[in-house]
Image (cartoon, rainbow, N blue to C red):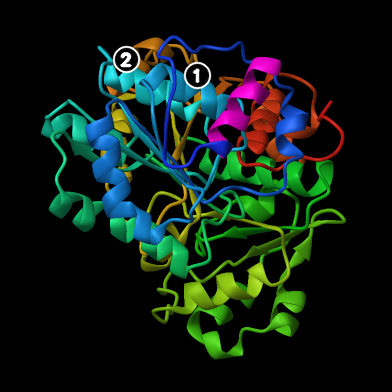
């Protein structure tokens, strides 16, 4: 611990560049509670493997950075150790040079940076497939291969920093969470319902749960509630959306969980006025700490708007080739606002008889699942039939949902039992 504190003091005291020993590799012994207690996040921290790259990055990016935000000359392993020992800044720039397995390096990086961090990367790999993998599926906002030049840095890195500066910095992810599934039947609504239930009723955070499937949505049924036409009205006539409409339409599923679910006629398309999704989200944000939305897998105009506006996307898939095929298509959907982090991936119904093995899927996709929920045919369906959240029952399902809540930053002073 003393090594880490001494080392971080040296960084803060440096004037321009800090050159650290490549062998620097402290033990990760800092308590999580101590890290979370630090309220302020720095704007930026950058790492470069060589001084030439550091000088060029500093020259191009410094006009948009504060005086104490610098580029440190270290290897990738040392940058991981530094990030693990500090509160992650809003923007992180890493250098993957020297890593034999850069994909694995990115996966290790995802384990030490906090949700809500914007990550940019440079490196020696010049490969289109690598670029697509890390920027579409692994949370890297932008990647540039070496050798660097002023033009590409100005075009690709500078707008990311300047946009965040205009917007007042990065917003922590997990406040507006949108679920979607790789296909029907993977359990998207079940996972979304139980996550919202845990955040609202176990972690005591004011939470709104919205079912974007207005024809055949199941969230209200899962919680033993009645659907109404409030959501349909909000989407058709957004100028009527106010706190009074929400109070009349939202149904309580606990002291701090409210549900908004519609049930439109099957023989009619529901009217959706473009932009009304954003109006609804703004109204919900004014009242709730967390807004959890189930966009389903049909991707209606409303669902697509939700995914475009999401602070954090969560993709639910099952161990099937159909899910593997559709995952890349979902990851390729571009968002209107900058996504604060890569989509979180949930493998539901793991170890289903005849399903793909988790290890095979992770190796094929080149990533790791953020949450894995085992196949529990005797627990989850029974709970849904009785309108009882399966997360209220101690066991592996509850543990997985609790882990997903922590990943989103939804925690309380007491650990979830």
Vertical arrangement, residue 223 with respect to residue 83, above or below: below
Residue neighbourhood size for the residue with mark 2, other residues' Cα within 10 Å, grouped as few (<14), some (14–19), many (≥20)? few
Which span of residues is magenta-colored?
Answer: 1-12
Residue 316 picture location, percent across and down: 47, 37
Judged from this view, the residue extending furthest toward the bottom is: 239
Q: Which SS class for mark 2?
A: helix
In this orientation, which residue lies closer to the viewer: 379 or 211?
Answer: 211
Q: Specify the farthest residue to the front.
A: 15
The total number of labels drawn is 2
Along the line of sight, the residue nearer the viewer: 374 or 128: 128
**94 sits left or right of 386 in the view:** left
Task: Kindly identify the residue that appears in the image at 63 percent across and 21 percent down.
Answer: 4
Q: Position of residue 38 (x, y in %)?
A: 72, 41
Above or below 36: residue 365: above
Of residues 170 and 214, the one drawn nearer to the viewer in this rendering: 170
**Residue that badge 2 annotates:** 363
Where is the C terminus found, in terms of image quarters? top right
The x and y percentages for residue 396 are 68, 19
Residue at (53, 85) in percent of width and height: 238
Tell which tag, 1 or 2, sits nearer the viewer: 2
Disc marking residue 350: 1
Quadrant including the N terminus? top right
Residue 349 percent coordinates (x, y):
52, 23
């Amino acid at each position: 611990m003393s090594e880490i504190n001494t080392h971080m003091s040296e960084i803060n005291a440096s004037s321009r560049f800090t050159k650290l020993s490549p062998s620097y590799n402290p033990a990760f012994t800092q308590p999580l509670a101590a890290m979370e207690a630090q309220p302020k996040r720095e704007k930026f921290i950058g790492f470069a493997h060589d001084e030439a790259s550091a000088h060029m990055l500093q020259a191009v990016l410094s006009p948009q950075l504060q005086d104490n935000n610098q580029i440190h000359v270290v290897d990738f392993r040392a940058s991981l150790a530094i990030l693990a020992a500090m509160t992650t800044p809003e923007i992180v720039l890493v250098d993957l040079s020297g890593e034999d397995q850069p994909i694995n390096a990115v996966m290790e990086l995802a384990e030490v940076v906090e949700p809500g961090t914007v990550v940019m990367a440079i490196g020696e790999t010049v490969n289109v497939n690598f670029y697509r993998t890390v920027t579409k599926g692994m949370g890297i906002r932008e990647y540039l291969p070496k050798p660097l030049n002023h033009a590409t840095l100005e075009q690709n890195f500078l707008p990311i920093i300047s946009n965040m500066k205009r917007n007042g910095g990065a917003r922590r992810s997990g406040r507006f969470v949108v679920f979607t599934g790789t296909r029907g039947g993977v359990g998207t609504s079940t996972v979304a319902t139980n996550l919202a239930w845990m955040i609202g009723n176990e972690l005591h955070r004011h939470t709104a749960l919205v079912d974007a499937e207005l024809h055949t949505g199941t969230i209200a049924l899962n919680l033993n509630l009645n659907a109404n036409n409030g959501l349909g009205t909000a989407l058709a006539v957004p100028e009527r959306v106010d706190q009074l409409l929400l109070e009349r339409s939202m149904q309580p599923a606990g002291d701090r969980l409210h549900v908004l679910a519609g049930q439109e006629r099957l023989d009619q398309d529901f009217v959706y006025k473009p932009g009304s999704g954003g109006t609804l989200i703004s109204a919900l944000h004014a009242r709730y700490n967390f807004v959890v939305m189930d966009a389903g897998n049909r991707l209606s105009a409303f669902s697509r708007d939700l995914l475009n506006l999401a602070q954090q996307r969560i993709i639910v898939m099952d161990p099937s080739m159909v899910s593997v095929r559709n995952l890349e298509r979902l990851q390729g959907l571009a968002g209107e606002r900058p996504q604060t982090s890569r989509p979180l991936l949930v493998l539901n119904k793991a170890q289903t008889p005849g399903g793909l093995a988790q290890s095979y899927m992770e190796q094929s996709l080149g990533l790791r699942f953020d949450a894995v929920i085992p196949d529990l045919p005797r627990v989850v369906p029974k709970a849904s039939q009785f309108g009882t959240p399966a997360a209220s029952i101690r066991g592996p399902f509850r543990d997985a949902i609790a882990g997903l809540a922590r990943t989103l930053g939804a925690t309380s002073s007491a650990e979830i039992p």
